[in-house]
Amino acid sequence: MTNKAVFLDRDDTLISDPGYIKHPSQVKLLSGVGQSLTLLKKMGYLLVVVTNQSGVARGILTEAELEQIHHHLKKLLADEGVYLDAVYHCPYHPEGTVKKYTKESDLRKPQPGMLLKAAKELDIDLSQSWMVGDSYRDIAAGHRAGCQTILLDTPGKTQVRDFYDPEPDKRAVNLREAVNILRMVEFQQKAQAARAARGQDEEPAAAAAPPAADVPAVSPAVEEMPPPAEPDATKEDTASAASVEDTFIQQPQAPAPQPSAPVETKPEPRPEPAAASAPEDTSRQLLEEILHRVKTNSRYDQYAEFSVFMLLAWLVQALAAFALVLSVWFWLDKDRGVEAVQTMIGYAVALQLLVIALLMMHDKNK
Ligand SMILES: [Mg+2]
């Protein structure tokens, strides 16, 4: 197994999802997808699309039509200079109307069949690979195949997670941020490998160090260290600068104490946390949800596609604010009449409406 891959869901990951896509003309790449896939290629990943296409089983489109759709998808990406290594689809569904395709299948996500098939055919090391998609079915398929996973958690699109769905390893607002996360993970892995290599170099020097009796056993600070905290999902959902710092600010591990005789130690009982009352629970959950939404939207803005409409909206917004300031100034100025104030307020309102229109056009063209 020599290759690593990024397995990609198709709809709402690479292209917009208007429902069942039946014709190549409906294929619209999401913003930034070409650039993101180009970066993944440069990082050495194979690009493999794995997509459920129950529309075939339901008689909405044929496999030949699906082939044309995927051919067009490849052409759109080729126009942006990036090539897919493979596209796998599952045409089966247990509630189909076309007999040939009406059945359960291990290929259908959340089953990992498509990923396992690709791994066999393309010589892919699944433990070095990632699954990226916008639903928990994608995450489950990647998890079962032994890949790491990134859930695209787009603002405004609620992800429904069943209790048996695995949590993703990471979360991103779009493919652009997912790629950024992968770059950060690779950077951290290289840094850890470099530290490990440095540690091995230092081992011979440690062997020639003074005997253990001369070395203080374990510092009180280490003895009193609290047990590792439970993993915090919020710390994993973004490749923030803080996460880089965490990686490099780890304290060097102290050598394990070598007691002359085994000593039995009893763990101290931990105090049970006080049970929170129901209103407190609700308030905390509400605050956590608000925090999650704020963080997600902030990241979405960070990774959102720039557009001319957005630029114009900002410029017109500045003019609208200026018109509003002028209207206040005219109102305070005794020499100006009421008409001048009303005119300036009229300009401000008109400009603000223009801003809203530009933002709507920006959203429509994303
Ligand atoms: Mg999808």
Image: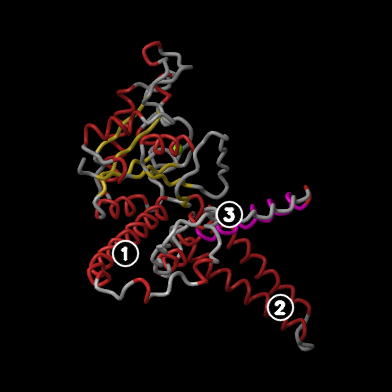
Looking at the rendered image, the disc whose residue lies closer to the viewer, 2 or 1, is 1
Q: Residues within 10 Å of mark 3 (few under 14, many from 20)?
A: few
First in sequence: mark 3 vs mark 1: 1
Q: Position of residue 194 (x, y in %)?
A: 27, 65
Q: On the image, numbered disc 3 is attached to which residue?
A: 267
Label the magenta part by its dominant secondary structure. helix
Q: Amino acid at mark 2?
A: Ser
Q: Residue at x 41, y 47 (%)?
A: 30
Q: Amino acid at mark 1?
A: Ala
* Residue most extreme to the front: 261
First in sequence: mark 2 vs mark 3: 3
Cα separation, mark 2 vs mark 3, equals 71 Å
Looking at the rendered image, the disc whose residue lies closer to the viewer, 3 or 1, is 3
Q: Position of residue 347 (x, y in %)?
A: 65, 70
Q: Position of residue 116 (x, y in %)?
A: 30, 32
Q: Residue at x 69, y 52 (%)?
A: 272
Q: Quadrant of ligand 1?
A: top left
Cα separation, mark 2 vs mark 1, equals 58 Å
Q: Amino acid at mark 3?
A: Pro
- Can you tell which mark lies on residue 327? 2
Q: Which residues are magenta?
A: 280-299
Depth check, front residue: 340 or 28: 28
User: In the drawing, does residue 3 fall left or right of residue 337?
Assistant: left
Mark 2–mark 1 CB contact (< 8 Å): no
**Helix, strand or loop at mark 1:** helix
Q: Residues within 10 Å of mark 1 (few under 14, many from 20)?
A: some
- Can you tell which mark lies on residue 320? none
Q: Residue at x 36, y 38 (%)?
A: 146
**Helix, strand or loop at mark 3:** loop
Indicate yes or no whether the magenta region holds residue 55.
no
Residue 261 in which image quadrant: bottom left
Q: On the image, numbered disc 1 is attached to which residue?
A: 191
